[in-house]
Image: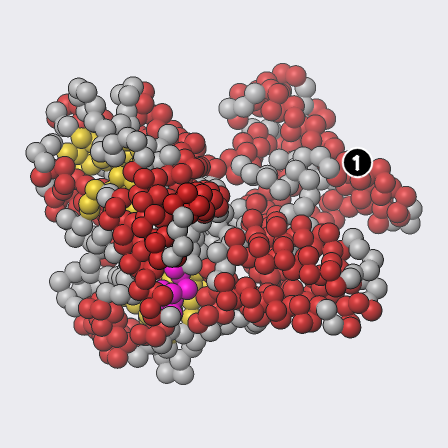
Amino acid sequence: MNTVMGLIDELRAEVKKRRIENPQELQPILSEKLIALLRGDEDAGLKYADTGITVFLFVGVNGVGKTTTIGKLAHRLKSEGKKVMLAAGDTFRAGAIEQLEQWGQRVGVDVIKQESGSDPAAVMYDAIHAAKSRGVDVLLCDTAGRLQNKTNLMEELNKIYRVIRREIPDAPHEALLVLDATMGQNALQQAKLFGDKTGLSGLVLTKLDSTAKGGIVIAIRQELDLPVKFVGLGEKMDDLQPFDSEQFVGALFTKWAAENEAE
Amino acid sequence: MPFESLASRLQNVFGKLRSKGKLSEDDVNDALREVRLALLEADVNFKVVKDFIAKIRERAVGQEVMKSFTPGMVVVDIVNKELTALMGGTQSKLARSNRPPTVIMMAGLQGAGKTTSTGKLAKLLIKENHRPLLVAADIYRPAAIKQLQVLGEQVQAPVFSLGDQVSPVEIAKQGLEHAKEHGNDYVIIDTAGRLNIDEALMEELKSIRAEVKPDEILLVIDSMAGQEAVNVAQSFHEQLELTGVILTKLDSDTRGGAALSVKAVTGLPIKYAMTGEKLDAMEPFHPDRMASRILGMGDMLSLIEKAQESIDAEKAKEMERKMRTAEFTFEDFLEQMEQVKKLGPIDQILGMLPGAGKMKGLQNVKVDEKQIDRVQAIVRSMTKQEKQKPEIINASRRQRIAKGSGTTVADVNRLLKQFEEMRKMMKQLSSMMGPKGMKNLKSLKGKMGRRFPF
């Protein structure tokens, strides 16, 4: 809500400055503003360790597509020539470990796992040590989906984060919150609370191939300064792309236009 | 609690109304404006909000309210009724075919919670002495079949699978045959998540529907979804003729407005709501009860049902007698805690109590279930004699108990003190029931504000 108010104020000022009279001229200005907002100043690429293992941690609520994103990112990194390993940190949901294993097979990377129901922080510990001894470049850590208002589960996540930090002081090099594009206002709350526990560094926006627009990332960028790093556009291995703010804003408007026409 | 932030905003609005002896039209209008904002911020569909407010205004500005002695209450009552109607009026039960098996098909976007819902629904049906068969028709997502198999094992329901190389239509068809042969009276078909605009996959669902003729096609919706949820539901409904909705992740801090709009926009009843990660955390959806929970009027009916389900009546009677006569010992205390734990997560139970949302300090209470375990550990580390006569627990005994339970002496002390206070309170309560009656109520009030004994 605040973001929208701020934008409208800015837009109003711009209208005065440029003496715009035709409402249609507004759209390009709004796009411009949105793109600038989403792009921010920094580069949205992934941050890697200077030397040794790079660790990426994936967090989010249930069913947003964490495991699928990891599978796709593993494929992407591997095709860039990196040695990748996956850590099956979702020890809670039925079939989650198997799901990650299948992705591992599909992509052709190792998966470190323990029994279902075991301590996820212990899995991370194991995975980091295995990654060290096998000379892995990038370790992708899966976690179980959890609702941000479940205190105990969020503490568990914090423990995972602490264990990773203890083993590799500047890790995780990226802590990515996976968000579902169909998510509403609640996504902002998720970004805040997950950020408290794991020091988020960016977002992955999934299911953008749906009719949803995922406009909430604008608010998150504005209020919490978290950039979108990747977008998920389908269920195949190649359906993960770096975020392109121009394309995103463009799609935002075409989807709007399509809706208006329909109405 | 479901719809938490929406609930607290609405309760604030009506709190102001209640305190007024007379209501002018302006008062009602002010309140309605606030209600409107609250609903919009909760992602409720714009058109739905407009209709909703119009209906309330029509009734609230009428004669009956102005003439009433408690106009505020009348307005709340009207809102309660309209909110109930908005969510579907009465509870909508699961269909039951005259010629079993009853076939239920699950559908929805990716990650809404179809497979988990399938497992939970099976558990609920088994509890009602049905024999459901789960059919694994999600051949696309890695390990989806495995997930259903694990869930099936946990709830002890058979799972039918043909691997991930056979078409879902064929799986559904053979699954139904299998159920007929094996005398299963319910068949739940778990399908792969799909986008409503994915024509090929939607076609697949249509073929399954044509093949097995489901009695129920349930759309699984994530209650954290935004405005988009309504569009998705409508699109699924147009293509598949759904029969109902399951709301998942209602235990999140979502305002759940989209969920509120789905019924109004599509006309589909909400059949179940998921309220937790555990497999028994699924409730039939009662619009009336949910409305009164949102308005802070509590949901005693659900609480009583839960209690009846999980508390042993004989034991409860005995406990009540002990409380009255203040014979209550640590052994009883332990037993009571077991029973309370069976009811489910404590913060959810609190949400069902009328006015609990407004009680000071309870609002943000995060009950730590582990704390209960710790208290249980302390009590279990006592000898039989100590449990019956806590007076004998001296310093060295305290030290032993602390060591035995992995806690500190301070923890043990605190528990002993709280237990003593609880006993005192019980004595007062029981004397209150007696002839001297209300006199003691005042002295009690001061004590009620304290923390729970655990």
Front position in the image: B263 or A116: B263
A87 is higher (above) or lower (below) than B345: above
- Could one spot residue B339 in this view of the protein? no
Q: Residue at x 18, y 30 (%)?
A: A138
Q: Position of residue B146 (x, y in %)?
A: 24, 54
Q: Quadrant of the C terminus of chain B?
A: top right
Q: Left or right of A57: which side holds B367? A: right
* Left or right: A107, with B338 as reference point: left
User: Is residue A175 in the magenta section?
Assistant: no
Residue denoted by label 1: B446
Q: Residue furthest bottom?
A: B98
In the image, the segment drawn in magenta is B228-235
Residue B229 lies within the magenta run: yes
- Residue B422: where, in percent of width, then height? 73, 36
Horizontal side of A13 relative to A130 (left or right) equals right
Residue located 91% across and 49% down the image: B435
Residue B448 in which image quadrant: top right
Return the x and y of residue A174 as percentages of the image width and height: 28, 31
